[in-house]
Amino acid sequence: EKTAIGIAHSKLILIGEHAVVHGQPAIAIPFPLIGVETVIEQVPGTVKIDSAFYHGPMNLAPDSLQGIVKCIKGTLDYLEMPPEDLLIKISSSIPPGKGLGSSASVAISVIRSLFAFANRTYSEEEILDLANIAETHAHGQPSGIDTLTITSSSPVWYEKDFPIKYIDLKEDFYFVVADSGRVGDTRMSVESVARLLKSAPKRIHRKLERIGELTHQAKHALEKAGKHLLGHLLDEAQRELEALGVSDAGLNRLIYFARQEGALGAKLTGGGNGGCIIALARNEVHSRQLAENLRKYGAHAVWPFVLKKQD
Ligand code: MEV
């Protein structure tokens, strides 16, 4: 019996979310502590999906899976495979709706598994184009940064319509990601910023540009100036995101607490309005303490991790 497997890790936006949708740069990092694995088995009948949220025929999948359903159909079409005789088993350790790129990771692992099943190799471009079918459904107007970061193994500098650049770190940086517990909806957040931009173009454009400037400075901090400047920039970016209306009380509380516990800086990561924060720790020991304290303080999940200087 034929089977195939496809995996994908998660991603984090360090700085520049939302502004990146409107042409500003953003910096994102691959987050390999969590990810998605898809296994495909040949099983007679219609295409079936087996996931934590749904088990059954693809054609009867609930609304929440429509992005991935479109992506599966698009990929089968592209591979000229008939939509039958497949059981697609998706297992993910990425909490959905938390700004961690769950939708893009699911799409990429599913696409990789379908290519493997068809014995076809793929180019980066093919994967990204197909994954963006799912992202357009999830984000409305995706910048493409999530899919790009998920297929990368180093931090990326991303600007819409420009080739990505990789960032060469000055030193190791220690972070903690903490989940506020509330599920966010990236599509709604992206749409609310677009509405604000329409209603107060000058003021909001200035804010998006300011996030762009902070992102440029963050690249300098990662490559040359180091963690103290980076922490300060994360705090500044959070102020702008709050002004854009994409932070919420749960995120603000965790951010405040992280700073109180000695984080060099902290902000929301991803779509916001629910989801996760990212805090910059002083060193490895501090990242573990900070994670522990954030959990005691009520974070639903915490992940201390290091962004390692490449050799
Ligand atoms: C989501 O991870 C990042 C956003 O900027 C949306 C996007 O870029 O597509 C909020």
Image: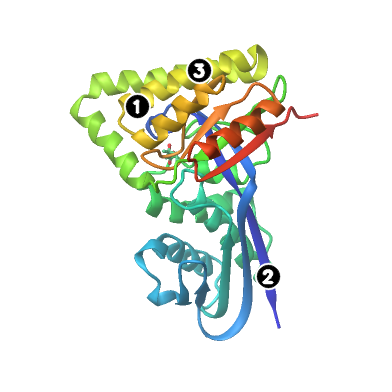
Q: Is residue 121 shown left or right of residue 258? A: right
Coordinates of residue 21 in the picture (x, y in percent): 40, 35
Indicate the amino acid at tag 2: Ala
Q: Which residue is mark 3?
A: 233
Quarter of the image with the N terminus in it: bottom right
Q: Kindly indicate the quadrant of the structure image that contains residue 61.
A: bottom left
Indicate the amino acid at tag 1: Glu
Q: Which residue is mark 2?
A: 4
Q: Which residue is mark 1?
A: 242
Give the residue drawn at x 37%, y 22%: 240
How far apart are the alpha carbons under marks 1 and 2? 44 Å
Let me know if residue 12 appears in the view.
yes
Coordinates of residue 280 in the picture (x, y in percent): 58, 25
Q: Viewer-nearest of labels 1 and 2?
A: 1
Frontmost residue, 164 versus 59: 59
Which badge, 3 or 1, comes first in the chain's sequence?
A: 3
Total marks shown come to 3
Note whether 260 is above or below 81 in the view shown: above
Q: Quadrant of ligand 1?
A: top left
Q: Viewer-nearest of labels 2 and 3?
A: 3
Residue neighbourhood size for the residue with mark 1, other residues' Cα within 10 Å, grouped as few (<14), some (14–19), many (≥20): some
Q: Helix or strand or loop: what does disc 3 sit on?
A: helix
Give the residue drawn at x 54%, y 39%: 295
Frontmost residue, 193 versus 84: 193
- Are dots 3 and 1 in contact, CB under 8 Å? no
How far apart are the alpha carbons under marks 3 and 1? 14 Å
Coordinates of residue 12 in the picture (x, y in percent): 55, 38
Note whether 58 is above or below 261 in the view shown: below
